[in-house]
Image (tube, helix red, strand yellow):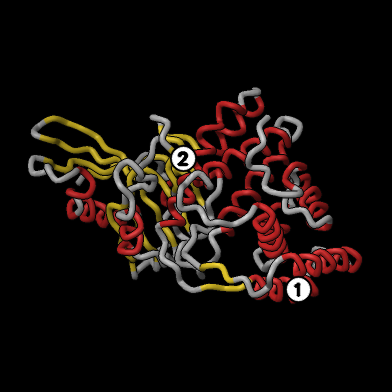
Amino acid sequence: MALNSEDSNEDKTMSEVGSKEYYMDILHRLVEQKKAEIFGRDHSGLKIIQLSFGRILYKHPNSYGRILQIKYLFDGVPKTKDIFIKFRKKYNLSPDKYMEIYNKFTEEEQFLPKLYFYITLEATDETVIGMEYIRGTALRNILFLKVIFGKTLELKDIFFENGAKMKLFHSSQREKGKSTVGELLTKIRNKLNSSPFFNTTEKEKIHQHLLNMERDVDPSLKLPLINIHHDWTLRNLIVREDGKLLVIDLDSIEWAPAWCWHDVVYFLFNIESQIKYWPFVSVKSLEFLWRQFLRGYFSGADSEPITNELLSKLFYLIKLEHWIDTFSIAKFYNRGLGKLYVKRLKKSLQMGHYTIFRRGRSGLSVDEDD
């Protein structure tokens, strides 16, 4: 195998234990072993010529992802194929679990990238994952450009599709038990009392909202717990070059099971937070996209018979829990431009509203058009 070095400083992105040659040797063996998964069943006339690292796509403290380019001959004809390589510390999602989820969907329904290989390296205490590389653009980037140029309506279908895909994903997951609304109320009250994100007066207002909610919603109401995505956000939604929407990063799916509504509310946080780019991004545009997402989510015939009024209250509770949780939304967004969103968000929670959007305060506003 020929090792192509594009940048003498690239080793800085590798583990301190393993060199580029160390990783390339492993990757070459994996690519050889997984030809059928990567190239399809008809790979008998295929010969791997060279592997080389492409650009780094993202870099976080515990993981980073980059392109691996494979140069090969197929029946004597030179070809190239890019795949996505992720290096991650302490990765808990097994390949069998990932493929179990992947195989739940038909080819037409499929919105997850295919997994090619997965190996844990004891020498560097990390996991190397090889996956289908999606050529496309994060929905976060598309949203920003469309909205600032007054083309929000062009996003209507993709946000509807996003909601429908989240619902399809949730419907594919087996129930892991149930938990009651009362359990969440108790958890919130306990955390609220010690939360540094509200002062005493603000806490009193929220406690009153919780009391009112307890009268309106039966605390003994049980809702199913399932494995959810936990990070269904604009940056993890990729619009492929052909316009198809795919969802990436299932790293957190084996966290504790939760109500499906936690994914929905987490996506609401993500949409609302784009108001940090005001005045380039307007509340009206974001509210429109939120409604399209909800319409997609509730478009399926198997949607739960649950009222908008009940859901708006559940959304408020979940949102409040995220605000005061250990990994707090307040901490996550309260920096830079995000402070503009945090100010609006905190005010809406004190007022008992599940969203900063005006027409969402008394319900989900799914049926309203601009």
Q: Marks 2 and 1: which is nearer the front?
A: 1
Q: Quadrant of residue 120?
A: bottom left
Residue 199 % position (x, y): 87, 65
* Residue sitting at x 68%, y 43%: 365
* Residue sitting at x 67%, y 36%: 368
In-image side of 342 versus 205 (left or right):
left
Residue 178 visible from this viewpoint: yes
The secondary structure type at the circle numbered 2 is: strand
* Residue sitting at x 77%, y 42%: 358
In-image side of 348 versus 328 (left or right):
right
Residue 334 % position (x, y): 74, 53
Which kind of residue does numbered mark 1 sit on?
Arg
Residue highlighted by disc 2: 238
The secondary structure type at the circle numbered 1 is: helix
Q: CA distance from mark 2 to mark 1?
A: 37 Å
In-image side of 207 versus 225 (left or right):
right
Looking at the image, which is closer to me, 236 or 335? Answer: 236
Residue highlighted by disc 1: 189
